[in-house]
Amino acid sequence: MTTGFQPQHADFTDLATGFVPFPADRADAYRRAGYWTDRPLDSILGDAAARWPDKPAVIDPAVSYTFAELAARADRIAAALLRHGIRPGDRVLLQLPNTCQFAVALFGLLRARAVPVMCLPGHRSAELNHFAAVSGAVGLIVPDVTAGFDYRELAAELVANNPALRFVFVDGEPGPFESFTALADFDGPIPEPAPVDPDLPALLLVSGGTTGLPKLIPRTHNDYRYNATACAQACRMTGDDVYLVALPAGHNFPLGCPGLLGSMTVGASTVFTTDSSPEAAFALIDKYRVTVTGLVNALAKVWTQACEWEPVLPTSLRLVQVGGSRMTPDEARYILDGLTPGLSQIFGMAEGMLNFTRPGDPLDVVLNTQGRPMSPHDEMRVVDENGHDVPPGEEGELLVRGPYTLNGYYRAEDANARSFTPDGFYRTGDRVRIFADGPRAGYVEVTGRIKDVIHRGGETVSASDLEEHLFAHPAIYAAAAVPLPDEYLGEKICAAVVFSGPPITLAELNEFLDQRGVSAHCRPDVLVPMGTLPKTAVGKVDKKKVVAEILARG
Ligand code: OOB
């Protein structure tokens, strides 16, 4: 129900400060193509609630809501947030684990016209302080205690450091703060949401890089609504699908590729799990007949291995998207054989651009490429170190622009000067080749990160090339090639390795690499056995931490 109670005047000037919009000519083209519809991002939920009011929208082990219930809850949260004094355009840090309350909070914020900053549960004070300072956030939504970590202590520290941060809502026991759960009990009048400018950010994602602090990525109503809708279509999602959020829900991959938002565009249900172990995930997949999920490589491998002994297998899965870091053809084959016949490789980034292999693509493409662009309006260039386009089919750095790729990080002028070309292409830092002919024509292979190299003596050694050879050894389950400081060489090559069985020695490894034709200066100088490789908040191998751990061992 809506009444005469109006929110405060919606002034988006502050939100727009430090935001780089799409240039008008490209924006016009995306509208003409029908990609951009000028509707707010939360209309995805409004539309679903109108079309499928009684279908389950979100499910977790504790609770589930239909689309109509979720929409009603979001409206009450929005009204309560506005009553507390949050204003349209205000940024609010959202750091909830994978439960239905994540969706309630996300849509509550969007309905209030606040702009969620999508933090991951693994982020700690360094990241959160940075997000708060850069975004100028006025609020924070956190759980009480999850996985043994008390987020209320983190909240207290953030409030002390960031004067703008005035509102903290806690899902669970609030301690000294406000209860998030109580917001949904709001029984006052529900205001009509303020109009939005669909070319302004609907939310801010955080960048996935492992160098330095993550940057904030503005995703507009127009671009992100298109992202979710188009991705669901390309993945052939229908209302019969059930999507499992196994990665942190605030990450672009499970949020909008197609994830929660894409699922909603077709009336599919979304299941949340905070426990992505095979035991827990397989049980949920079986119970709710989950058909689609997205995984990072390391998790996909763990799930595949577990298929050898788990009593309940994930047989209902029709599409498992795997992405986030480089996957060798052997790894792809392993996952395809052991976990799912419906593997899709996805090469994406929070900054926008998505490439993926499609259901029905030939096996060769699924095993050997990271897919092709989602949109006919995605523009890709591959350039050499001088910024010149390389000949078709050759390797270089990928530059991208298109209807759902950012034009600048939020409030980051210096980074933007480095990360974008004058004509608006985003420099991905990814080394790729785009196949020029044959059955793989138009598909992308990611060959590494341009900066992921080891400077050994006068030589530049590609870490990912070496890793591909390391993976080929049957005794090696996971590996990272990283630089270690060296008095004579500058950097020496370290292979940090998780063995799948009995360990091998450096000499045995190097003999194997020699047989594979790896030249002497590209072979490891040191072999360090690891129990596991440290991961980022979304579960990718974190090379900075690998080096730190090894150096700390002395
Ligand atoms: C996804 O997003 P982010 O923002 O966490 O990380 C993006 C970066 C890319 O620039 C690339 O370096 C790497 O992660 N990456 C891949 C890859 N997918 C991502 N590298 C090699 N092969 C792949 N398949 O990671 C992300 C966002 C949406 C969907 C899927 C992944």
Image: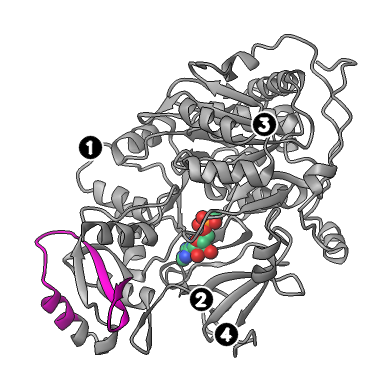
x, y percentage for residue 118? Answer: 59, 42
Q: Which residue is mark 2?
A: 431
Q: Residues within 10 Å of mark 4 (few under 14, many from 20)?
A: few
In the drawing, what numbered circle is on residue 436? none
Q: Residues within 10 Å of mark 2 (few under 14, many from 20)?
A: many
Q: Secondary structure at mark 2?
A: strand
Point 32% across, 40% down: residue: 277
Q: Kindly indicate whether the residue at mark 1 contacts the one at mark 4 (C-beta within 8 angstroms).
A: no
Q: Which residue is mark 4?
A: 385
Q: Quadrant of the N terminus?
A: top right
| Stretch in magenta | 483-512
Point 59% across, 20% down: residue: 180
Q: Secondary structure at mark 3?
A: helix
Q: Which residue is mark 3?
A: 107
Decide which of tag 4 and tag 2 comes sooner along the chain: 4
User: From where the camera sits, is residue 493 visible?
Assistant: yes
Q: Secondary structure at mark 4?
A: loop
Q: Is residue 420 magenta?
A: no
Gap between marks 4 and 1 measured at Cα: 51 Å
What amino acid is at disc 2?
Answer: Arg
Decide which of tag 2 and tag 1 comes sooner along the chain: 1
Q: Quadrant of the C terminus?
A: bottom left
x, y percentage for residue 208? Answer: 52, 55
In the displayed structure image, the side of residue 446 where residue 196 appears, left or right: right
What amino acid is at disc 4?
Answer: Glu
**Relative to 501, residue 38 above or below:** above
What amino acid is at disc 3?
Answer: Phe
Q: Which residue is mark 1?
A: 311
Point 41% across, 34% down: residue: 274
